[in-house]
Amino acid sequence: MKTMNKSDLKLIAVLERTGGFASAQELHQILRREGDGIGLTTVYRALQSLVDDKIVDLLRREDGEAIYRLCGDGHHHHLMCKSCGDTVEIEGGAIEKWANTMAEEFGFREVGHTAEIFGICSKC
Amino acid sequence: MKTMNKSDLKLIAVLERTGGFASAQELHQILRREGDGIGLTTVYRALQSLVDDKIVDLLRREDGEAIYRLCGDGHHHHLMCKSCGDTVEIEGGAIEKWANTMAEEFGFREVGHTAEIFGICSKC
DNA sequence: CACAAAATGAAAATGATTTTCATTTTCAAA
DNA sequence: TTTGAAAATGAAAATCATTTTCATTTTGTG
Ligand SMILES: [Zn+2]
Ligand SMILES: [Zn+2]
Ligand SMILES: [Zn+2]
Ligand SMILES: [Zn+2]
């Protein structure tokens, strides 16, 4: 972790405030909406640097778009209704264990994972 | 799984021949190199349809590019190296149980899930 | 202050994927 | 075999996230 410039701090602040994942474009819009004139390029650069410094996690949406979250954020998974879109945040203890076990078994390190459950909720 | 047209079959054939993962662009180039004048659009369409029919897996390279591979039988998950792209298909017994438990707890039905693990493999 | 390095952002470039749309192929009914 | 509608095809244009360029501004230090 080298330096930490003004933009890096701004991005960390937004990520803290919003919690969860957000794309670069979304984070840029949020900052703009709040009156910050930061440029999209700078947002990308700050996120890149934060990822390099392992301060931020980079994952991918289903369509491939990059999404970011603060490392150490309360990690959780989602249960989403395919019909109405309602989403519940759930604990993933079993998943964490599974991911670590499997990764270890195959000699992987710096392990991460994604896991989502979807179905039809009781209201639908 | 509805119909299976000529292009779908071509793509399946290439994927069989090459084994492992390849991007749409790469698969298109391979077909072209082999003298097939198939269009890039058609390659994308065929892959989409094969993914919908669960005949091929869609994963993502580290840069977000979509990569495809013929899927083995049965339900499984992936452990992929972020660096070299090597992928292992793994059992997900714990996941299945977890997904069902959570879904039941929140009253969801027709439940499905996705789960992928990624990290750095021993060779990298 | 002066000056070099670092940061910034507008605009252009990139590159994968999708959309449009006119044309061709397929295929079953007549 | 002929015919018309539906499905398939692909070239070109459109999208859209991300990166690159490059001229300008800010920062830090002597
Ligand atoms: Zn619902
Ligand atoms: Zn988890
Ligand atoms: Zn698979
Ligand atoms: Zn590897």
Image (tube, coloured by chain):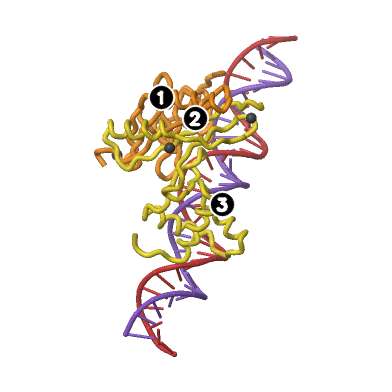
Chain colours: A yellow, B orange, C red, D purple
Q: Secondary structure at mark 3?
A: helix
Q: Is mark 1 within 8 Å of ligand 3?
A: yes
Q: Are marks 3 and 1 in contact (CB under 8 Å)?
A: no
Residue placed most toward the observer, A63 or A81:
A81
Image spot of residue B117 (x, y percent): 38, 35
Q: Could you tell me which chain the residue with mark 2 belongs to?
A: B
Image spot of residue A36 (x, y percent): 58, 64
Name the residue tied to disc 3.
Answer: A26
Question: In the figure, is residue B63 to the left or right of A65?
Answer: left
Quadrant position of residue A37: bottom right
Mark 1 crowdedness (10 Å alpha carbons): few <14, some 14-19, many ≥20: some
Image spot of residue B69 (x, y percent): 41, 29
Image quadrant containing the N terminus of chain A: bottom left
Tell me the kind of residue under disc 3: Glu
The answer to whether residue B42 of the structure is visible from this angle is yes
Quadrant position of residue A34: bottom right
* Residue at position x 24%, y 39% in the image: B123
Q: Could you tell me which chain the residue with mark 3 belongs to?
A: A
Name the residue tied to disc 1.
Answer: B76
Quadrant position of residue B45: top right
